[in-house]
Amino acid sequence: MLIEETFSVATSINKLYDFFLDAEKVGLCIPGCESVEIVGENEYDSIIKTKVGIIVTKFKVRTMIEKTVPNSLICTIGHGKELRNLGQFKQKTEIKLKSLSENETEVFYRAEVSIVGRLATFGDRIMKSKAKTLGKEFADSVKAKLNNINQ
């Protein structure tokens, strides 16, 4: 499943790039993220709880920052397992930043996500709809956090 989103944030590209590299700050923006633990350089674990259809799921996720280009690009890979063995997933995400002005930055992200197990039976349409909702919540949270930092 491919998920893409573009949004802009009222902050400089430098601040936004640094923000995205801070796993603990970004974790607070991920809907349902209950914890983030740094496990190595550019590698962290998180627990994310979400509801898909009628099922509430909780994933343990390992994310690694695979590639960065300062103030321009962040690529991550990750994998996770639902804690009750309802499924597993893999993701590969690319975040591109583009300066629109001194105090506004455009964010484009593309995530390729594959899900296997009982959760996959919900089908692509339901999962995409849920992912789109979570993507909007994430974007709104990033904007809110950075607006608080800039004030």
Image (cartoon, rainbow, N blue to C red):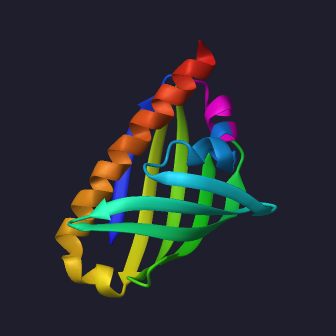
Q: Is residue 33 or residue 112 the one in the foreground?
A: 33
Residue 56 image position (x, y, % from top left): 33, 65
- Height in image: 25 above or below 112? above
Q: Is residue 69 or residue 31 the one in the foreground?
A: 31
Q: Name the quarter where the C terminus is drawn.
A: top right
Relative to 130, is 18 on the left or the right? right
Res 126 quadrant in image: bottom left
Give the residues in magenta: 11-18
Residue 38 image position (x, y, % from top left): 75, 58
> Looking at the image, which residue is at 68% across and 32% down?
14
Number of residue marks = 0
Q: Name the quarter where the N terminus is drawn.
A: bottom left
Q: Is residue 101 visible?
A: no
Relative to 75, is 54 on the left or the right? left
Q: Is residue 120 or residue 70 the one in the foreground?
A: 120
Q: Is residue 3 visible?
A: yes
In the image, residue 122 lies in the stretch drawn in magenta: no
- Height in image: 133 above or below 147? below
> Looking at the image, which residue is at 30% across and 85% down?
118
Relative to 19, is 100 on the left or the right? left
- Height in image: 141 above or below 2? above
Most extreme residue toward the bottom is 117
Res 55 quadrant in image: bottom left
Most extreme residue toward the right is 41
- Height in image: 79 above or below 64? below
| Secondary structure mostly seen in the magenta stretch | helix
In the image, residue 14 lies in the stretch drawn in magenta: yes
Residue 15 image position (x, y, % from top left): 66, 30
> Looking at the image, which residue is at 72% across and 45% down?
70
